[in-house]
Amino acid sequence: MSIDEQEPEYTDNEPGAVAGSSAEPQTSASADHSHSGSIPVVSPPTGTLSVERLAIKALEARLLGGERTLRRREVAAAAGVSLLSARKLWRALGFPNFGDQDVAFTEGDLAALSTILDLVRAGKLTEEAAISVTRAIGQMTDRMVVWQVEALIEDMVVQQGIPDPVARKRLVSELPNLVDAMEEILVYSWRRQMNAGVQRLAVRAEAGLQASEAGREGDEDDAPLPLARAVGFADLVSYTSLSRRMNEKTLAQLVQRFENKCAEIISIGGGRLVKTVGDEVLYIAETPAAGAEISLALSQAFTEDEILPEARVAMVWGRILSRLGDIYGPTVNLAARLTALAEPGTVLVDAMTAAALGQDERFVFEPQTAENVRGFGEILPVRLSRGLGRGLVLD
């Protein structure tokens, strides 16, 4: 549907509107997962508002940039777009379900919607691209806010010696002192990350594609994919059994230590942490050598860590598809399969990745027994070890 295409106008109670089945997602009202626009509209109790409630109301006005004065149809009409098209963008941002009579939106919401629509109308973005970009912002900021809130609460529990429920309430009064600084850092970080992304795209992409041709016939499964990257996985050994023996606090500390160490090493090595899932991290680098250095540094770091268990690590050089902040393709799948084959404290690569690293004296290669790998047939794993040089300098 075009961004300006009109739709039949139904209210929530008119024929044609299915009760409880609006296209808008039903978002949890939990304070731990709230973000801009996702605080439900709740009528205040009769009588004097509590101090806590007044603090929440004041914080909301500051975060949203003003009072909620608009209904959803008023916002859509003022932006010159159908309600259906407006809802597409609100869904992409992760907004909850609001009814026709809910006074849920601010002038800031109208301005944001208009900004997105102006990009589409000017031909700078297609509607599909606008929704995708908007969804990226909504999902990433949602996860970021949850992470930040939990980090602040945990710090208050430890530093102030108060229970978790008390810290959650007290955070409302602490946040006004932090909001401006956190917003400034967010914008700064976005600009730096965007610049880094442009540099990867414009400066090093072609060199990576040329390097990915080494040792290939051109008919490999990943040949049609656009990006050449070193793809690596690091997987903690015995995480499941360890987690069963830990209380909530100890487990949280272990996971945080794991993620922090991974993020630090991958960043120093010039790679990008794609995602973490429990006891596993997925990362990429732009050259085979950078991927190898990161992989060896991760393996060594976990082996030497007094708290974390050892890790299985694997890395494959090949082509990938990057979409929605994630990566896809046979290269990713092969790296995951090799990780499962690696012994604790070791790094595995495939034969083609070993060939791509060539005669680099920083690395030593030890072919292993051929393995029949699901989806790939017979694969020759190669153990990667440190050769000459210091490797990544982490301090």
Image (spheres, rainbow, N blue to C red):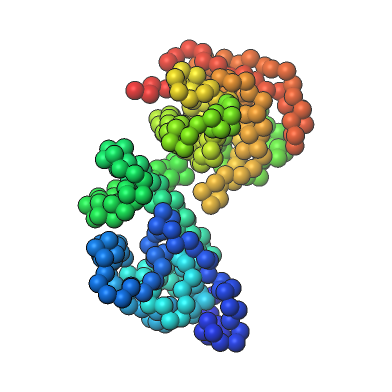
Left or right: residue 124 compared with residue 169: right
Could you tell me residue 209's position as x and y percent?
A: 56, 38
Q: Is residue 267 above or below residue 12?
A: above
Residue 268: quarter of image: top left
Q: Quadrant of the C terminus?
A: top left
| Residue that appears at 52% across and 26% down | 295
Left or right: residue 169 compared with residue 277: left
Q: Is residue 256 above or below residue 179?
A: above
Q: Residue furthest bottom?
A: 15
Q: Quadrant of the N terminus?
A: bottom right
Left or right: residue 44 compared with residue 320: left
Could you tell me residue 222's position as x and y percent?
A: 66, 40
The answer to whether residue 157 shows anywhere in this view is yes
Could you tell me residue 217's position as x and y percent?
A: 71, 33
Camera-side residue: 76 or 192? 76
Q: Is residue 73 above or below residue 196?
A: below
Camera-side residue: 174 or 123? 174
Left or right: residue 279 compared with residue 263: right
The answer to whether residue 195 shows anywhere in this view is no
Q: Residue furthest left?
A: 177
| Residue that appears at 33% across and 73% down | 45
| Residue that appears at 32% across and 48% down | 167
Camera-side residue: 57 or 231? 57
